[in-house]
Structure formats: C-alpha cells, structure tokens
Amino acid sequence: MSSSTRDAIIDRTPTGSLPVIKPLLGWRVLVPRGGKWGDGIAAGLRALGAAPVIAPLINFAGTENPDELVAELDRLREGRYAWLVVTSATTVDVLVGQGVHVPEGTRVAAVGETTANALQLAGYPVHFVPSDHSARGLVKEWPGEVADGDVLVPQSEIAEPTLVSGLRERGIAARFVSAYRTVGVAAPASVVEDVAEGRIRALLVSSGSVARQIAEQFAPLPESTVVVCIGPRTAFDARAAGLRVDRIAEERSSAALIRALAEFAMDPEDRRPPVIP
C-alpha cells in the first residue's frame, strides 16, 4: 500500500475491523452545476471524504427561436423523423416541457448512459447508446442506414457541430434545431475568493461551457488547484480556454468524473491509476 493510500485511511467500519479508504479527505471540490446532477456528484464526493462546494456556473434558458423548435417537434410527433438523437438531460427536460410523444416508428439514440437514464425516467424509449459516450462515438457507431429517413438532433444553440456534420458526412439527413440556450452564472464572491486563495482544491469540469466559465471567472488558477474533466472533448475545450487539465475521466459519467479525481488524489503521478470501485 502506498503512503498516499495509507494517509487516506481515516475511518473504520462500525465493528472497527475494516478500514475505510477516503482518498479525498480534506479536499474542498467545486461542483459547477446544481440540480440532480450536482446533488449526485456531491454525494459521491462526500462518500470519499471530500467537502463539495456546489456553485452552478451555467444555467439553461429557452431557445431564441421557439417557433422553429415547435415546428420540428411537430414533425417529430407526426412521424416524419426516423431517429431522434438526444445528447443531454436538458434536452429531455425540453421534450417533456413541450409534451412530446415519440411515435412508435421513431427510434431514439442517446449519446451516453446519463442521457439514456434521463430519457427512460421521463418515459421515452432508448434504442441505441454508443459504447463511446461522445458525439464522435455516436457517429462512428451509428446503427441506422441512409434509407431509414431523417434524423432530428435538438441541442444547445452553442453545441459543437460534430454530431450533425458527422452524420451528414455519412449521407444521413440530420437536422439540428436549437432546443435551449446555455448561459453563464456568476459564482458567489466567497467561492471566487476561495478558488483564488487555493482553499478549493479541485474543480470538476463537466462541459466546454463550464470550462469557459471557469476560465472567465477564476483564471488564473493557483498552481495547486486540480482540474478534472469529464472526457476528452471537454478536456480539449478546457485547454482551449486556457486551463491546465490534470486528469480526464475515461467515460462521460458522474461516477467516472469522481473516480478520476479520487485516483489523482491517491497518486498524482500515476498515468494508469488504480480503479476505485
């Protein structure tokens, strides 16, 4: 057992017989989104000894072109789309808010398990989730055929064109429509000060939008601040925003994001750190 692992053993089971490893003991960690996502991340961090600081840096607002969105969702209801591609839980909220019923003949693809879970909880079917939970993975593993028909992709107005352009390059008629806007939210002054003074030891980056807000509101970050991103695309966006990336979660999931930070805490120099169940 490494010294960093020994230092992380701070508690024992009620019987006192088994050690409990909490690698994030003493770490204050910024959770950049609220709601169910933020609450879930916070709970996972606490289980590993961390003190989460929930400070939403982005929020979501209605699209600036609501008539266009309504028109495309009407086409979806009429069965004029062969596939509906959903890339975020926020899009699921939009579908629910608009009272969208997906016709039986329309298949639904989710970019990852988190989005798939949100769809299923809302009562929507999920027919495909790529093994690589990313837009590129979805394009690469796309199960449909050109002859299937059109594909509707409702996303944030600032979404990267990777998904739609990738499907179009394969000859698939993919249609983007703005479903919502992503807007920045100012962090409380106390959080800004804590980040600047190094009292918040790690920042979790869940999207390119969050990365840009971190750069805008907190940069330059103290050298000691650890930045962990939820996947390669988010890491790319974070670096483009001028942030140093210390660790990248292997999967686009909350569990993987927390695990990446915990693995860094146990051994910052290890490029292939042990997996924490």
Image (cartoon, grey):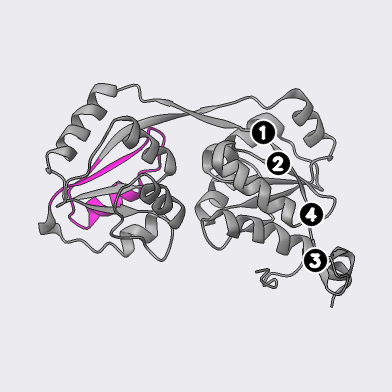
Q: In which quarter of the image is the C terminus?
A: bottom right
- Residue at horizontal 30 percent and vertical 54 percent from the top: 109
Asked if the residue at tag 1 contacts the one at tag 3, i.e. Cβ–Cβ closer than 8 Å, the answer is no
Asked if the residue at tag 1 contacts the one at tag 2, i.e. Cβ–Cβ closer than 8 Å, the answer is yes
Q: Name the residue under label 3.
A: 21
Question: Looking at this rendering, what residue extends furthest in the front direction?
Answer: 15
Q: Residue type at mark 4: give it.
A: Gly
Closer to viewer: mark 2 or mark 3: 3
From mark 2 to mark 1, how far is it between C-alphas?
Answer: 7 Å
Q: Name the residue under label 1.
A: 55
N-terminal of the pair, mark 2 or mark 1, is 2
N-terminal of the pair, mark 4 or mark 3, is 3
In front: 4, or 212?
Answer: 4
Tag on residue 30?
Answer: 2
Q: Indicate the position of residue 248 as horizontal and vertical percent values.
A: 61, 58
Q: In this view, does 225 lie to the left or right of 206?
A: right
